[in-house]
Image (cartoon, grey):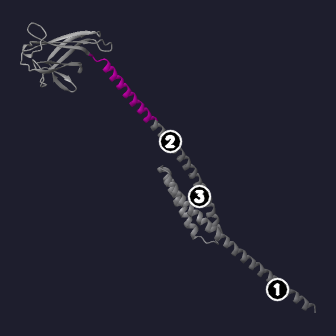
Amino acid sequence: MDKSKKLIGVIILLILIVCGVSFYALRQKQENKEMEQLYNVEKEEMENEYSTFATQYDELQVQIDNDSIKEKLEEEKLKTQRLLEELRQVKASDANEIMRLKKELKTVRAVLRSYVVQIDSLNRINAALTTENQQVKQQYHEATRQITSLSAEKKSLNDKVELASQLDATNIIITPKNKRGKAEQKVAKVKNIAISFTIVKNITAKTGERTIYVRITKPNNEVLTKDNGTFPYENKQLTYSIKKYIEYTGEEQNVSVYWNVEEFLPAGTYQVYIFADGTMIGSQSFSMK
């Protein structure tokens, strides 16, 4: 009887042991399955991150003009792509490889973050330099505009000074005379044409010897001349009738010149033009019948 009880007890103990082992094995298998599922999810998330990082390296290369940094970004991108391929080849059950690639992912993330900060800083510096360059260009254009304006003002002032310094002939009197020196209107009796005028006072005009040119034109606009002498006027050479040198002092000065008639003169209206320093300083007309 005692032996039977002992045998039954042993059998029950064995059954309990088998049940415990089976339960443990089943539980372990369940845990392994759950862990594998977790690793699969984690592996998929890591693959997405690696892929995203590789794309971000491409985007960073577009944002920077520095060739040295571009080269380093390309190296990091290739490294990220290599790790991504390793991850895709690893089985979810290989916990050690998963953990290694997870650590590598942290490194990739940190490196990428450092490049993002560096490139952002460089871009801000470039933006500041671009703004400064634009400001310098604007200042240059403004300075150029001011210089141009000053040059125009200077030219205008010089023109005004030059205009103010020009001589001016007034009180122009033209008297045709006969052989007795009397005023004569009949052209056939005229032997001499007396021309007198006053050069007005001008303190801005330069003093010294000046050349006065008198140009007399007949009714048909032909110029009276003895030697076909010319003088410069408005980029061309004009024929003069009379040339006279005067010593100009800046004060009012009376000038007289004469044309001795040695040619046939037709009746009609004649023009007298007076020039000095390349400028016409006076004109007057007279008639003979």
Q: Circle 2 — which element?
A: helix
Front in this rendered view, residue 158 or 189: 189
Q: Which residues are magenta?
A: 139-168
Q: Where residue 48 sits in the image (x, y, percent)?
A: 59, 65
Closer to the chain start, of discs 3 and 1, is 1
Q: Which mark is residue 131?
A: 2
Q: Which residue is mark 3?
A: 108
Residue at x-position 59% and y-position 63%: 49
Amino acid, disc 2: Thr
Mark found first going from the N terminus, 2 or 3 = 3
- Report the residue marked by disc 1: 15
Q: Which mark is residue 116?
A: none
Callout 3: SS: helix
Expressed as whole percent of the image width and height from the top left, the position of residue 32 reads 70, 74
Q: Looking at the image, which residue is at 56% across and 65% down? A: 84
Relative to 101, say whether 24 is above or below: below
Q: Vertically, is 120 above or below 170?
A: below
